[in-house]
Image (cartoon, rainbow, N blue to C red):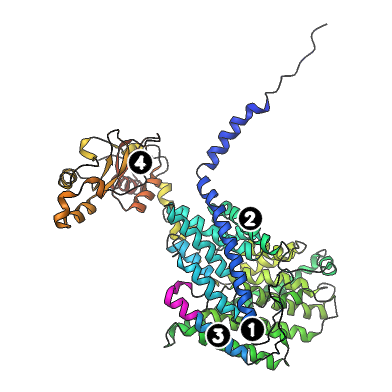
Amino acid sequence: MGQPATSPVPSHPLRWFPEFWELGRRRLRPQVRVLGLSLVVGLIAGLGAIAFYVACQVVVHYSLDRFAGYHPHTPGGEPRLFSETDEPFHPWLLVLIPTLGGILSGVLVFSVAPEAEGHGTDAAIAAYHFHQGQIRPRVPLVKIVASALTIGTGGSGGREGPIAQIGAGFGSFLGNLLRLRVAERRVLMAAGMGAGIAAIFRAPLAGALFAAEVLYRSPDFESEVIMPAALASIIAYCTFGIAFGWAPLFTLPPEVLNSLTFSNPWALVPYLFLALFMVVLAMLYTRSFYWLTHLFHRLPLRPHFKPALGALLNGVVGLLLYELLGHEPQVLAVLSFGYGILQDAMTLPQAGQVHLSFALLLLAVSLGKILTTGLTIGSGGSGGVFGPSMVIGGCGGGALGIVLNWFWPALAPHPASFVIVGMAGFFAAAAKTPLSTLVIVSEMTGSYSLLLPTLWVCIIAFLLSDEQSIYSSQVESRSRSPAHQGDYVRDVLTGLDVRKFLTPRDDSNSLKPGDRLAEVAERLSSTSHHALPVTDKEGRLLGVVSLEEVLLAFRSGDLGPLVVAADLMQSVTPLHVDDPLDLALELFAESNLLVLPVVDDSPERRVLGIVKRSDVVSTYLRHVQGEATPRRE
């Protein structure tokens, strides 16, 4: 008999480990620095969310509660840090207290950091596109105090704007501190923005998606942001959860959760009506918001006091609605955060048991919130627009749901579902963020049972909405963003690297740290280079001396003979011979130099030569003009 066939012995699993390690190292190496720093950004965003939450609670307790006797409802998942006082309600103080808060906020903002006015998320978007991810470190600190004063005293605004600016501001600060590239600083800033959203709304997945989606008005994503924003959002969410628990922002009783299901395709018809209604509300919101903003900017009044005027009118609107609706306290949700009425609307009883008068109340809150938010934030007050958007969309959707429930109970069995879906559909139309809004509302309510109708409403509302967005700094798409203006250059220069443009190092194009000023000037004047690398005896890079620094040294007068190259040199990020030309162009732009040193891959960073910016730009222009092969001159 022959020997039985034997199967090949598989290799030991440990032999595969080096291959997987090398594969993972190659994939993560370009991002490991940003991914690691995003964890730090998430921690700071979470701590900032805790600080801002506490600050808001303190201001609300010692202004609206203790003095005005107003005890606003809160969502079920939002813990109260203070017990309600026994102070009787004084409606007229709801005009005076917001005005005082507006004065304090306006003077603080316009005296210290004017860019902290308005809604912080839009300022972070503008910093990403137009300011290379730069946010002054003082802005988030001013934003915390100013927003707590504005919203805590009764101004209509949300928490997400200040928290997003806190996270984005720290991401920008960290990028500057560690001298990261502009692209990396932008990513950290956007990750911080998403982390703030994740913490304050207990929505980590939505925070990551929101940071990548909110930058554009079109259905475009900033793909480089998603992974860092996801890590930052997880850490921020956990940090906030450790302090205040893990419950969703809105808590729904079991009987309501069990009824919020989708099992009838015909129910998409009333949800279609909801989407159309949300589009109309969103258009009214964005247009009135920026009309009021423009109106306040034109007022002949110092900007320091405009937030007080807006807060005064905000209080007047709240008081008028309170009187017109027969002293119904729930209508005062048009002031401050207003989340409590969403919690009440989500716990409505089943079909046919809700009176139409409650629909009128919800509609009044929805329209009133549009007006008070425009007055508060448009006048220069500090706060977010996401929170008010949830109230506007949820109350408007709830009002429509009650009406449809009375006339069409089989297809609209529970008005609470229209509250939840309305929140998502409204913000999808107003902010052009259909996917992240879909997720954030599901995470805020702790239920994904309405995912399909919410997706239906969000997509329709987004497609039918106009170009006006509540975030005016959004750009149309990645191709229109200044952050990606170099992408076309990268496409043109694909396949070319620094090696082709290297001028080898010799005594004529390098300096020693002890070279005197006159010698440095002579060396620069004898070459066509506007900067030269400084190396030690072993050829290691120490820095770069530019022609501008030499000219400044000559103007110093008697100190000129004492100056040496070591005094003039500046640190710079060098190139390597295998670096692509798009990276070279980016480093030229960041350093503002016309010459960059090229070093080897050793830890000593020995200088191999230099690359001139003019050579790289000339090659780019020749490619654009259609030349097939780059030439060196």
- Could you say where residue 181 lies in the image, as x and y percent from the top left? 43, 51
Q: Write the start and end of the magenta stretch as one range.
A: 105-116
Residue 596 appears anywhere in the view: yes
**Disc 2 or 1, which lies upstream in sequence?**
1
The answer to which image quadrant residue 627 occupies is top left
Residue annotated with mark 1: 64
Of discs 2 and 1, which sits in the foreground? 1
Q: Quadrant of the C terminus?
A: top left
Residue 472 appears anywhere in the view: no
Circle 3/circle 4 CB separation < 8 Å: no
State the residue at coordinates (72%, 91%).
327
Residue annotated with mark 4: 628
How far apart, in angstroms, are the residues tagged by discs 2 and 3? 36 Å
Query: In the rendering, which numbered label is found on residue 311?
Result: 3
Residue annotated with mark 2: 234
Q: Is residue 378 above or below residue 28?
A: below
